[in-house]
Amino acid sequence: MKLTYTQKLLVVKDCEQFGVAFTARKWLLSTSYVSNLFYKAKNNCLLPHGHSTKYSPEFKIIVAKAYAKGIYGLEDIAQLYGIRAQSSVKNWYDIYQSQGEEGLINMNAQGRQTKKSSTKKINVNKLIDSEKPFSEYTHEEEKALKMELLRLRCHEEFSKNSRP
């Protein structure tokens, strides 16, 4: 049975009043599911579908320390603290192990980090067509030409190997 967010809140309310076992029987749910909902609500992690969860650095430190104790596994820690993705627990633990609490406090925003290029893109075609002497090329321009040469060599090698 798929519950709406409102129904989940009602399950949590019943769980607080009557306990996990009674609530599970009443709603025809497993006790582990009811427990999981209750823990999520207790840790303010029970959100409507589609809403992202942002965890405080202090919370991440608590979770990382709990996992570092080695008593519970990733799945158990995630369920206990109401964390949707076990990978979050593992990432926080790895940062905690390598950088300590400071690493979690100074952790960047969620999601994949964008790759920032420190060099501007060089138009190799314009560079080749220019009559600029090779000795006047900047380091970035030389690098761009070498990369183009490597690309062409790879293309040529691939073309040779793909012919019958």
Image (cartoon, grey):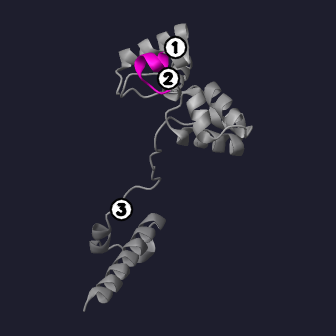
Secondary structure under badge 1? Answer: helix
Give the left or right position of residue 48, taking residue 13 as reference: left
Specify whether residue 164 is in view.
yes
Residue 14 location in percent, x, y?
A: 48, 10
The residue shown at (27%, 73%) is 129
Mark 2 is on which residue type?
Answer: Val
Of labels 3 and 2, earlier in sequence is 2
Of callouts 3 and 1, the N-terminal one:
1
Magenta-colored span: 23-30
Mark 3 or 1, closer to the camera: 1
Give neighbour class at mark 2: few <14, some 14-19, many 20+ (Cα, 10 Å). Answer: many
- The residue singled out by tag 2 in the image is 34
Q: Tag 1: residue type?
A: Cys
Residue 28, magenta (yes or no)? yes
> Would you place residue 97 above or below residue 5 in this image?
below
Q: Which mark is residue 15?
A: 1
Residue annotated with mark 3: 122
Q: Quarter of the image holding residue 62?
A: top right
C-beta proximity under 8 Å, tags 1 and 2: yes
Label 3 sits on a secondary structure element that is loop
The residue depicted at 54 percent of the width and 40 percent of the height is: 86
Near mark 3 (Cα within 10 A), the count class, few <14, some 14-19 or many ≥20, is few
Residues under labels 1 and 2: Cα distance? 8 Å
